[in-house]
Image (cartoon, rainbow, N blue to C red):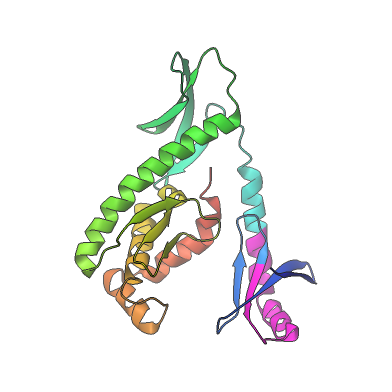
């Protein structure tokens, strides 16, 4: 639950939670979400938004422009990100009864039935299915590598399509990865893997937690910034 507010040109929603700090999150739709501890006044929140106004408006504009650019038609020649590189969509008509996709070289090929009506959603679903499969394979591989380095590993790995999280670690020792990270460069994939594995050691974002992350990835802040700046383009 949350309350809608307006500050200057910024529309935002406040969600109250049991937490110590105020967080600002821009969703992949360009919505501004303010997560605040109980008891913090609206005036305090407004002052924080005022200080961050330029960053918020610039970020919202960037995401909305990206959303416009990513208004897919799912036709030959469209470009799709995969591990930081662009793949060109090639639609191949044939006799296969099921629409499926595969990656070959610098192309993502989608095979559709010659006699059936195929919508953009059908092609999109085929690409998503392929990306989820590739994400499951790659995340397991990279998790195994860094688990040996850190000396910890998850009980189970789940591949999800999370709207606001790139990854998460449960108290049961399971790790969830957002399949859309497969679109980012491998350095960002590794950052998410290390980020979540370190939560098996520290279930928080304390100084000790970040020191552990930095011991594996000294440039983790650079990778984290890349994700903040470019995460909105990781979509199909």
Query: Toward which corner of the image does residue 195 lie, by quadrant?
Result: bottom left
Q: Is residue 132 above or below residue 231?
A: above
Q: Is residue 160 above or below residue 49?
A: above
- Residue drawn at x 63%, y 63% as measured from the top left: 59
Q: Is residue 184 visible?
A: no
Query: Toward which corner of the image does residue 167 lie, by quadrant?
Result: bottom left
Left or right, 116 with reference to 159: right
- Residue drawn at x 28%, y 57% as measured from the top left: 143
Q: Is residue 57 above or below residue 73?
A: below
Is residue 102 rendered magenta in the image?
no
Q: Nearer the viewer, residue 125 or 185?
A: 125
Q: Could you say where residue 139 lies in the image, as x and y percent from the top left?
A: 33, 52
Q: Could you say where residue 28 lies in the image, as x and y percent from the top left?
A: 60, 55
The N terminus sits in image quarter = bottom right
What range of the chain is rendered magenta? 33-60
Query: Toward which corner of the image does residue 218 lie, by quadrant?
Result: bottom left
Q: Could you say where residue 32 lies in the image, as x and y percent from the top left?
A: 67, 66
Looking at the magenta stretch, what is its main secondary structure? Answer: helix
Q: Is residue 128 visible?
A: yes
Q: Is residue 133 above or below residue 197?
A: above
Q: Nearer the viewer, residue 128 or 10?
A: 128
Left or right, 100 with reference to 66: left
Is residue 48 rendered magenta in the image?
yes
- Residue drawn at x 41%, y 64% as measured from the top left: 223
- Residue drawn at x 42%, y 41% as measured from the top left: 131
Q: Could you say where residue 197 lies in the image, as x and y percent from the top left?
A: 32, 66
The total of numbered circles placed on residues is 0
């Amino acid at each position: 639950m949350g309350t809608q507010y307006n500050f200057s040109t910024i529309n935002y929603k406040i969600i109250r939670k049991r937490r110590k700090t105020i967080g600002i999150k821009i969703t992949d739709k360009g919505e501004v979400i303010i997560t605040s501890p109980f008891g913090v006044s609206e005036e305090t929140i407004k002052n924080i938004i005022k200080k961050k106004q330029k960053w918020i408006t610039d970020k919202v504009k960037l995401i909305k422009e990206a959303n416009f650019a990513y208004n897919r038609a799912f036709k030959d020649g469209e470009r799709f990100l995969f591990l930081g590189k662009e793949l060109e969509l090639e639609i191949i008509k044939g006799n296969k009864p099921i629409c499926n996709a595969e990656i070959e070289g610098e192309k993502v090929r989608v095979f559709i039935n010659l006699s059936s009506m195929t919508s953009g959603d059908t092609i999109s679903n085929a690409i998503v299915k392929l990306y989820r499969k590739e994400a499951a394979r790659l995340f397991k591989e990279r998790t195994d590598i860094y688990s040996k380095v850190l000396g910890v590993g998850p009980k189970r790995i789940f591949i999800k399509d999370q709207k606001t999280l790139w990854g998460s670690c449960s108290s049961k020792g399971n790790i969830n990865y957002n399949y859309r990270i497969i679109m980012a460069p491998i350095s960002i994939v590794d950052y998410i893997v290390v980020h979540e594995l370190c939560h098996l050691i520290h279930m928080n974002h304390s100084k000790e937690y970040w020191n552990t992350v930095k011991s594996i990835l000294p440039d983790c802040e650079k990778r984290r910034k890349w994700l903040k700046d470019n995460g909105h383009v990781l979509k199909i």
